[in-house]
Amino acid sequence: MKFLSAKSDALCNTLKSELERYRYKVFVETLGWDLPSRDGRETDQFDHDDTYYVIARDEEGRINGCARLLPTDRQYLLGEIFPQLMAGQAPPRHHDIWELSRFTSMDLHDNRNTLEDTFRLLRKAIATAATLGARRIISVSPVGIERLLRQGGFSTERAGPPMRVNGHLLYACWIDIPVRERPISALPARLWRMLNARTAATPQGQIAGAA
């Protein structure tokens, strides 16, 4: 599994088209989700020039996983389509909270992807969001994802109870981004000062305990 993380406007039209066809086969044909689609391609109003994607490919260059990332201070899926999943709370609207959507690691060709491949893709998506300034991630997910996240060691919690939407049991899921994944610019000033102090107190300027 090889990864590409990029903003939509940096992707060539051929790759965008391939991604849209892959999403259609996964979410519409295989999972049976009722999503906007046309000519065998799945895309919606949240796929625009400022959207970020993480794309996974197999050894032959075929897409076998993807994730979509959007900042919540702009329009995003949960905030616009599924606000009821927040159990009466306002959907987050902040530059350092990003939404993860259209996540899948389904291999449509050889079905070789393992659970660890799924975790690798999710870690890559989280790391990408962190480099974009995210402190936390919110996602609309099937309830079965909750156990998978915990099995993978991710820090997660429900934003509200599950609800049945269009025949699917969904919930809003918080995923915390570990401090080590966040860029320095995204760290609170107090934590940044603490890290500076620890760096100064360790040999060769290395942070104690850092990998």
Image (cartoon, rainbow, N blue to C red):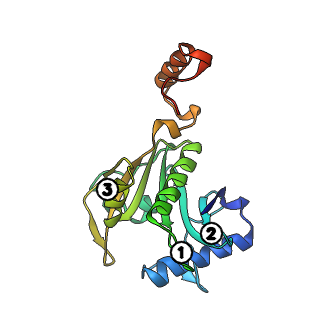
The earlier-in-sequence mark between 2 and 3 is 2
Find the residue positioned furthest to the bottom: 39
Picture residue at 38% right of the left edge, 64% below the top: 141
- Can you give x and y, in whole percent of width and height, for residue 204 in the image? 62, 17
Find the residue positioned furthest to the top: 201
Q: Is 80 displayed left or right of 85 in the figure?
A: right
Which residue, given by chain and number where applicable, does mark 2 sit on? 58
Q: CA distance from mark 2 to mark 3?
A: 36 Å
- Can you give x and y, in whole percent of width and height, for residue 100 in the image? 48, 57
Q: Are marks 1 and 2 in contact (CB under 8 Å)?
A: yes
Residue type at the position of mark 2? Asp
The earlier-in-sequence mark between 1 and 3 is 3
Q: Nearer the viewer, mark 2 or mark 3?
A: 2
Q: CA distance from mark 1 to mark 3?
A: 32 Å
Which residue, given by chain and number where applicable, does mark 1 sit on? 107
Say few, some or many: other residues with alpha carbon within 10 Å of mark 3 (under 14 / 14 to 19 / 20 or more). many
Q: Are marks 1 and 3 in contact (CB under 8 Å)?
A: no
Which residue, given by chain and number where applicable, does mark 3 sit on? 86
